[in-house]
Amino acid sequence: MGGQFYSDARLYDRLFPGGGQAVGFYRAEADRCSGRVLELGCGTGQKLIPIAADGHPCVGLDLSPEMLAEARRKADERGVEVEWVQGDMREFDLGRTFDFLFIAGNSLLHLQEAEDLVGCFRSVKRHLAPGGRLVFEVFNPSVRMLAQADGVRRRREALSFVDPDRGVVYVDVAETYDAAAQVTRGSWHFSTDAEADFAVAPLKIRSIFPQELPLLLSLGGLRLVERLGDWSRAPFTADAALQLCLCEPD
């Protein structure tokens, strides 16, 4: 899990602001399912708070107390009611069911072991109401990009952002890929012109390849109903950046 990476919730929000098309997609899916909503790995509530603002009863579960504290602050600031729960998506029991459950922003990929993924899906199944649906997104692994994870530190220009206290923050990343484990291990470095490496955080992300994904779901008691390739609901193809998965109990 990437605990240290998420210890500074406001820095995270500046690194990954908004949510763009993803927010609209999940809001539409919540409206389609109606009823109660649960987000696993909810972070600072970027996607859940707008869904709650639409009138859906919402619960957000996350392992990081720092992320949940920021989510609670943002929801209170907007006058939106959300129940925030600290918990582990690998195994959880909230004692109720939900009509729409989602896992956004590649959060599922923090679960590196197959048994953790299956455990998560089993917990999801227990929490789905009749007719309920799980929707999640994970990236579609690119063999070319994985092969470029050679441990060399490189600047990610597209990730640079402005911090109101520090000014322009630059992001450097060094990554290696463990093909046997299907895990990319990275070190993220945050710097300004005045302060080099004011924050350094490790991050491990698993790859889930398209053919193994339905099997993992099946072992967890779920089935893949539809797989999309982008937020416009285009069909999934080999060169799609996303695997946007709509699932139901098996």
Image (tube, helix red, strand yellow):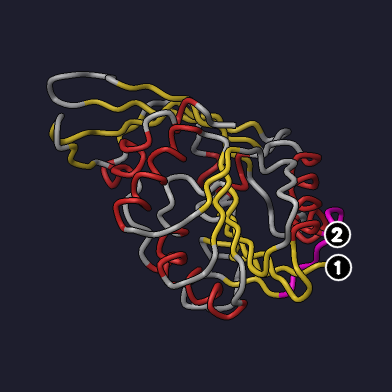
Residue 165 locus on image (x, y percent): 14, 31
Query: Toward the viewer: 151 or 56?
Result: 56
Q: Residue at x 27, y 20 (%)?
A: 198
Mark 1 / mark 2, whichever is N-terminal:
2
Residue 14 locus on image (x, y percent): 28, 43
Q: Marks 2 and 1: in contact by CB < 8 Å?
A: yes
Neighbor class of circle 2 (other Cα within 10 Å; few <14, some 14-19, many 20+) is some
How many numbered circles does the render carry? 2
Residue 193 is labelled as: none
Query: Toward the viewer: 134 or 194?
Result: 134
Residue 250 is labelled as: 1
Residue 13 locus on image (x, y percent): 33, 44
Label 1, label 2: how many angstroms apart (C-alpha)?
A: 5 Å
User: Quadrant of residue 179 in the image?
Assistant: top right
Q: Is residue 65 above or below residue 14?
A: above
Q: Is residue 150 above or below residue 140?
A: above
Q: Residue at x 69, y 53 (%)?
A: 209
Is residue 187 rendered to the left or right of residue 33?
left
Task: Tell me where the magenta segment starts and ends, as one range.
Answer: 218-225
Determine which residue is flagged by label 2: 221
Q: In which quadrant will I find the C terminus?
A: bottom right
User: Quadrant of residue 135 in the image?
Assistant: bottom right
Q: Residue at x 60, y 31 (%)?
A: 1
Tell me the amino acid under the disc marked 1. Answer: Asp
| SS class, disc 1 | loop
Q: Residue at x 68, y 64 (%)?
A: 98
Is residue 93 rendered to the left or right of residue 232?
right
Neighbor class of circle 1 (other Cα within 10 Å; few <14, some 14-19, many 20+) is few
Is residue 162 rendered to the left or right of residue 188?
left
